[in-house]
Amino acid sequence: MSARVVVFGVDGLTFRVLHPLMERGALPNFRRLKEKGCEAVLESKYPPITPPAWISLSTGLKPARHGVYDFWDFEQQQGLASPRVPRLLTHRKGGKAIWNILSEYGKKVLVINVPMTYPPETVNGIIISGYMTPGPKTNFTYPASFKEELFRIVPDYEIDLPAEDKTVGVGARKWRVLDATLRMTKRRFKLMEHLLKEKEWDFSFLGFVGADRIQHRLWDEILSLDAHATEYYHQLDDGLGRILDLLGPDDSLYVVSDHGFQGVSRSFEINEYLYSRGLVTLSRHSQQVRERASRKHALSYTLKRMGLFELAKKTKRIVQKMDVSQHLDPHAHDPHKLKAADIDWQHTQAYVPSSSGFGSGYADIYLSQTMHEEQIAELCADLLSMVDPKTGKPLLEAIYTTEAFGRGPYAPAEPHLLLLPNDGMTFRRGLGNVRFWDDAMMANDPSKRSGVHQKDGVLYVYGKQFKQGFQAPNAEIYDLVPTVLQTMGLLFSNAFDGRVLEELFVERLQPQRTTTIVSNSMEGSSAHHKLKKLLEG
C-alpha cells in the first residue's frame, strides 16, 4: 500500500487554547504531535475569515485566483451610482482543490464536511459537503447515492448546528451551544471512522467546525480552562487519537486550522469613521437613520458613565422603546444592516459593505477608483494613528493593499484596504457612534469578552518523513497543498501561491523514490501534458 495523507482541519483552532491545556497534562494526542512531529503557526491574513481561508487551504491559491473573499460576493457596480448587491457563496469560483488534482492522478479521496464545498464536485471518491450547505435535504454528497448510506451509518448526522443551538443564552442556556457541538462532533467521528476503515482512500480531508462555534460564544470560559467549556477539546483529542491509530507506518497526518482566535473587548466603527472623513455619502433616508442611531449611542454612552447601563438594559420598557443595547449585539451577521440602496454610491469614495468583520476580526474597505494615491496614503496614515482612548493601544496591527489578495482572474476591480486590528479589538460597520470606539463584550454577559477570529492558526505535521519535536517557522495557509503533494511524491509546477515547507522534512524528497511520480524526463509525453492540463485554470 502506498503512503496516504490525512488532513485534519479544525475551524478556528488556536494555540491560545491548545498550549495551556497541554501544559496541564491534557490532550495527549495533540501533545504526541508536538513531541513527535512538527508544530508551526499557520498564518491566515488575507483575510482571516472562513470562506477564503478554507478555500485557500484546499487550493494553495490566494483569493484573486479562487474568487472568494467573504460569505458574500458583492457584485461589481455597473456605474458609479449603482448599488452593490450581495450574493451568498457556498463554493469557490475558480482554481482546483487538492482533491481535484489527486482525482486526476487517479488517487482515491475522501472529503468530509469541509466548509465551502457545496454543491459537491465529481471526484475519484466521496465528498460530503460541509458548512454553507443549505441543509440535509439537499444533494450534499458525491456520489448522490452515498447520502442514503451516510444516514444508514449515522441516522442523526448533522452538517452544522441548527440555528437555535447557535444562539447566545443566559444562565444554564449559555452551554447549549457547547452541548450541541459535542453531540454533532460525536456523530461526525462515527462517520469518519467508518469511512476510513471501510473505504479505499489515498487522501482524506476531514473538517470540524466545533471550535469556531463555541469560541465565538464562550471564549473567556474556555480560556479560563473551565472543565465543561474545554470538554470539546478533549473530545477532539480523543478523535484525533483514533484517527492516528488507523494510520499505517508510511502514512502522514496534517492538523490545520483556517485561522486562529482571540478575545476582544473593544470595537471600532469603521463606516462611521469613513463617514466622518467625508468618504461615505448617505441617502436622505439613511442620514435620518444615522441621526437616530447617534442619539441612541449618546444615551448608551451617558448611561455607561453613570453606571446605569445594565439597569437600563434590564428595564424592558426602556430597551423596547429606545433600543439602546441593540448595537452591542456581537453576533449580528447581516450584510443589509445598512442597505446598498442607502448609500449614495456616486459620491462615496470608501465603504465597508460586509458585516463579517466583527466576528472575523478585520475590515475590508472598498475604495472608489476615483481616489488618488495621495488620498489613500493619507487615509492609511490617519488609520494608523487611531488609538483606543480606553486602553491606549493603537487600532491597527497592519494595513494591506489590494495586492495582498494576489493576482488572478478574480482580482478586485477596485482598490481595497484590508485592515487587521491589534489584539483585543475588532470592527463594526454601523453608523451613529461619533466616538467610533465601543465595548465589544458578550451581549448576554457584559463581563465576558467576545471571541473573534485572529490570523495565527495551527499547523501540526506528523509522519516518518518529518522531523520530530520541530518548532517550525511560521507558514501560510497557501502552503498546505504543495506540501501535501510533495509528501505524496507527486510532481507539480510552481502554479500555487504557497510553497513546499521543505524545512519540515527529514530530508528533501527525491522524485525517483516513488513510482507515483511523474519524472521531469517525461516532458513531451502524455503524462507531462496531463500534468500541465490539471494545473491550468
Image: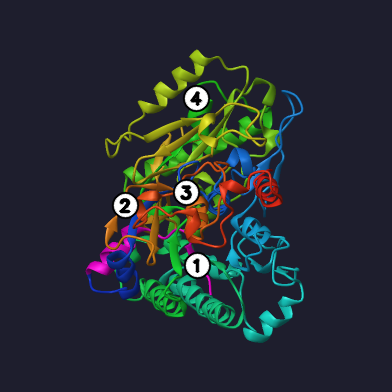
Residue at screen point 31% across, 71% down: 32
Residue tagged 2: 472
**Tag 4 secondary structure:** helix
Left or right of 436 in this view: 63: right
Which percent across, then down, holds residue 116? 62, 57
Give residue 479's mark. Answer: 3
Mark yes or no: residue 64 visible. yes
Question: Does the residue at mark 2 contact the one at mark 1 (Cβ under 8 Å)?
Answer: no
Q: Which residue is labeled 4 in the image?
A: 276
Q: Amino acid at mark 3?
A: Asp
Give the mark toward the camera: 4 or 3.
Answer: 3
In the rendered structure, which disc, 3 or 1, sits on the residue that comes first in sequence?
Answer: 1
Specify the segment rendered in magenta.
1-23
- Seen from the viewer's position, the closer of residues 144 and 204 is 204
Disc number for residue 52: none
Image quadrant occupied by the C terminus:
top right
Task: Using the rendered view, name the quadrant where residue 234 is placed.
Answer: bottom left
Of mark 4 and mark 3, the one earlier in the sequence is 4
